[in-house]
Amino acid sequence: MTKLFLKFISILIALDAFSCSVNSKNNEEVPEPNFYTQSGANRVAAEWEPAVGTMIVWPLSIPYKLVIELAKDNHLYTLVENENFKKGALKWYTRWGIDSNKNTFVYAPQGIDSWWVRDWGPGAVFTPGGKMKLADGKYIYSTPLTKIQCDDSLRFLYKSGDNKIIKTETDDNATMYLGKALNIELSDLPFINTGGNVMTDGLGTAFSTCILLNENQFFGISKEKFLNLNRNLLGFDRYNIISNFEKRGIQHIDCFMKLLDEERILVIEPPKDHELYKIYEDIVQNELSKLKSPYGRPYKILRIKSGRYKEERLAAYTNSLILNKTIYVPLFKIKEDSMALQRWQEVMPGYAIKGFEFDLAAEPFITQKMKDHYKTYGWNYEDGLHCRTRAIWDSGMLFISTKRIEPEVNSKHKNKVYTTIIDYSKKGLVKEKCKLFWRVTGEADWNNIPLNQVEDPNHFLTEIPYNKPGANIEYYVLAVSNSGRTETQPRTAPLGTYKFAIK
């Protein structure tokens, strides 16, 4: 399949992606694409892609136990305003046993929204030439919220005494300091790109609620211009705008759903007697279920049950951070917490699932500002763990995307596995070590097959040579780069694998 043909397919799919509530029709005549092709477009990294660490801010807006785990699992990038704040952070980090080699301090001024590094912070955009930049969207107003209708007027959380909107130029400019400290070039985005309301699969698809269009219109960016800028600067050929889901709120999509990978979505399920239950179900049934993945298939929509805390507020378990092979989940001190952790483990096998309560009275160090804002408990229904953390992605990552085999096939099916591998280190693949591993479920040993490169140097096609009816097969892809990086797809393989049944 040629690059030109693949680009043609992506354009056809993109043309069907832009109504407010329902973004994609079931266009059966469009053949399913088999490979992801970056071609001449930029590509924004998905949350689950390889990262070198996590960005947070000091003074803390997250529990100290989470800080310890983030440093232990990867690397911390702690934003501090000046040398005095650095000294204070260093004192506490030392007391908590955080190795100084597992943390990098970054000096940056802090505005009114500094805690929410997800919202003002940058994503990672890879150019067609393989260079990673920090995608720096505009973060001007603090903080827009709206009622449930997409055309409802915006309100703002913070206004001055004379009723003027408090702007956040300080936080909007913070990415510039981060880029200089990490020696990463910025890609300046001339539109609002609020991080908690933008999700991507890393394959040219984005999801947001419709308040983001409203925010951009307020900023002077029309819907058409917003979509064109996203396509041209970020490579989003498919932008799925779904309805708002709160009666009144900031409507950030990470409190409603989570992309787990290219073809699965995890959505909050409220209690059936909750006032938002029908609203959530309507979005699932009438919007998400009608969308298609980059591989031309309906998304697999999974649910995670939520519960009430603080009266009618819903515990936002999707407001979790996926970072490399660990998922960090906010807990709300309700009975549904344990079920949420179990559900995360079910849908993301092989990942370490770590839950974190945020009782302010139990924190050894917390500012008065934090206490004034949150009173007694640090997580909020629309402001959780995901909102206050952001990955710093690996600029030389080994990127893999696999079009998996359908869950059920017949015995005559050609069990072909289509894989895209991009070595952003530019060191080249160790091709003899790039393989597909498979086995019949229950067997101890893995069979392996070399990945066969096809016309595009980033595309590999492999066929699993097993067709016995009644068998269940599990498999994964492994790639090795001369840079020393090794990656699998799924990332937690062989603990997490792809599976299919032969009927």
Image (cartoon, rainbow, N blue to C red):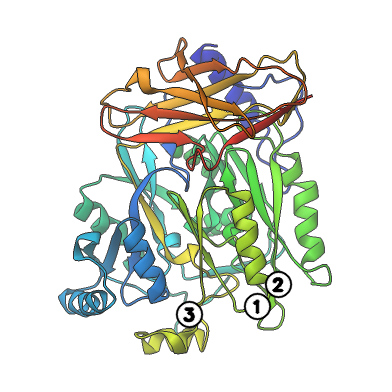
Give the residue number, with chain letter if any, for mark 2.
307
Instruction: Please name the amino acid that badge 1 sits on.
Output: Ile
Give me the C-alpha separation between circle 2 and circle 1.
7 Å
10 Å crowding of disc 1: few (<14), some (14-19), many (20+) = few
Give the residue number, with chain letter if any, for mark 3.
159
* Contact flag, marks 2 and 1 (Cβ < 8 Å): yes
Q: Earlier in the sequence, mark 2 or mark 1?
A: 2
* Secondary structure at numbered mark 2: loop
Judged left or right of residue 131, residue 476 is right
Give the residue number, with chain letter if any, for mark 1.
334
Instruction: Nearest to the eye among marks 1 and 3: give it.
Output: 1
Instruction: Nearest to the eye among marks 2 and 1: give it.
Output: 1
* Secondary structure at numbered mark 1: loop
Question: Camera-side residue: 431 or 28?
Answer: 431
Instruction: Please name the amino acid that badge 2 sits on.
Output: Gly
- Please count the marks in the image: 3
Quadrant in which the C terminus is drawn: top right
Q: Position of residue 244 (x, y in %)?
A: 68, 59
Query: Residue 270 sits in which quadrant?
Result: bottom right
Q: Earlier in the sequence, mark 1 or mark 3?
A: 3
* Contact flag, marks 1 and 3 (Cβ < 8 Å): no
Q: Which residue is located at x 39 percent, y 43 percent?
A: 50
Give me the C-alpha separation between circle 1 and circle 3.
34 Å
* Secondary structure at numbered mark 3: loop
Instruction: Nearest to the eye among marks 3 and 2: give it.
Output: 2
